[in-house]
Amino acid sequence: MTAQPLHLDEAEDYLGRVISALHTMAPERKGPLVAVLDFLLGHIRRTRKDLNSLRMAPGEPSLATAADELEEIVQETATATNAIMDAAEAIERIAAGATPDIRDALRAEATKIYEASAFQDITGQRITKALRALQTMEQQISVLVQGCGEEMLAGSDTQSASDDSALMNGPQRSGHANSQDEIDKLLASLG
C-alpha cells in the first residue's frame, strides 16, 4: 500500500498529536525529538499564518490583477507615445511651409517632444521588470498555498466590497470594457 502525501494541514495535526504523546513519555525516552518536533510544528504554523496574510482582502486586487494592470500601462503608454510622436511629425510637416522664424520655433518644440517621449521606453522597461517579479512571486506563492491544502485556496480570488470602493477601479483593461455601442444601448434602455 502506497502512502498518500500529507497536506500541510494534515501534517500539522499529526505532529501535534505526536508531540502530545511524547510529552507523556519519560524524559529519558524522548530526548531531543520533542524539541525538533516542536520546532517543525511552530514552523508549519508560522508558514500557514504567513501564507494566509498574503491573501488579498476582499475588494483588493490580486497579484494577477496587478500584473495585468502593469501590462496594460505599458501598452497604453506605448500607444500614447506613438500618438505624441505622430503629432510632433505633423508639426514638423506644417513647419516646413512656415516662415523661417516660425519653422525654427516649431521644429525646436517638436524636438523637445521627441526628447521627452524617451520616457516611454525607460518606464516600459522598468514596469516590465516589476511585472516579471510579480509574476514570479505569484507562481511561488501559488505553489506554497497548494501545499497547504485546498482551504487556503478557497476565496483567494474573490473580490467583493460592501462600500463604493468596489466601484472605483479606474479604467477598464483592454478586452474587459464595454464597447461604445453597448453603453449606448444601455443608456437608451434607461429611457
Image (cartoon, rainbow, N blue to C red):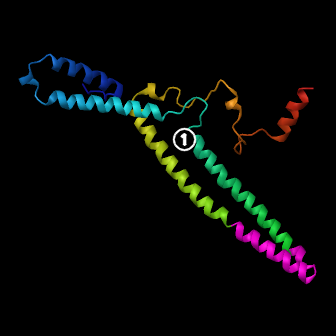
Q: Measured from the top left, where is residue 73 in percent x and y?
A: 66, 51
In the rendered image, the quadrant that contains the C terminus is: top right
Instruction: Name the dominant secondary structure of the magenta segment.
Output: helix
The residue at the point 73 percent across, 57 percent down is 79
| Left or right: 188, with 42 as reference point | right
The residue at the point 23 percent across, 28 percent down is 38
Residue highlighted by disc 1: 63
Q: Nearer the viewer, residue 189 or 44?
A: 44
Judged from the image, the secondary structure of the residue bearing numbered disc 1 is helix
User: In this rendering, is residue 167 above or below 96?
Assistant: above
Task: Give neighbour class at mark 1: few <14, some 14-19, many 20+ (Cα, 10 Å).
Answer: many
Farthest residue toward the top? 24
| Residue stretch rendered in magenta on the structure | 93-117
Farthest residue toward the bottom? 100
In magenta stretch: residue 99: yes
In magenta stretch: residue 20: no
Q: How many marks?
A: 1
User: In this rendering, is residue 126 above or below 146?
Assistant: below
The residue at the point 70 percent across, 28 percent down is 164
| Left or right: 4, with 101 as reference point | left
User: In this rendering, is residue 70 above or below 149?
Assistant: below
Q: Where is residue 187, by image quadrant?
A: top right
Q: Measured from the top left, where is residue 61 in percent x and y?
A: 59, 37
